[in-house]
Image: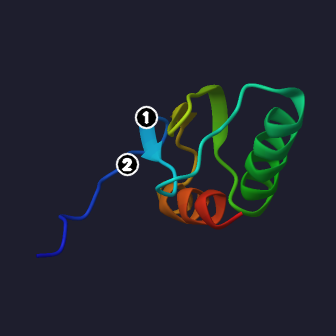
Amino acid sequence: MPSPRKYHPHGSVLFVTASLEEGLLLVANPLCQAIVRTCLARAQFLHPVRICHFLFEATHVHMLLVVDNPEDVSDFMERFKTE
């Protein structure tokens, strides 16, 4: 069953949680932090959303995003997950 479409109004603040690939753990070291920040920057460059704050845990990520263009949110998350 498909999930319902999400509505993101312009200028709203979203709390986004995304899980990582099963078996993939983010270790708290400078190399992993640099890789994750690079992936975020690339996704943000291609699909502009404002990232207010982010927190990475071992198996998932939490982000606070401000919606400028509602269509960019899903594209941003897709790009970030594929990076």
Say whether marks 2 and 1 touch (CB < 8 Å).
yes
Relative to 65, 10 lies left or right: left
Relative to 13, 30 lies left or right: right
Secondary structure beneath dot 1 equals strand
Q: Residue at x 80, y 38 (%)?
A: 32
Q: Amino acid at mark 1?
A: Leu
Q: Which residue is mark 2?
A: 8
Residue 4 drawn above or below residue 7: below
Which numbered disc covers residue 25?
Answer: none
The N terminus lies in quadrant: bottom left
Which numbered disc covers residue 14?
Answer: 1
Distance in Å between CA atoms under marks 2 and 1 = 8 Å
Disc nearer the start of the sequence (2/1) = 2
**Residue that extends furthest to the bottom in the rendered view of this protein:** 1
Q: Nearer the viewer, mark 2 or mark 1?
A: 1
Residue 80 drawn above or below residue 54: below
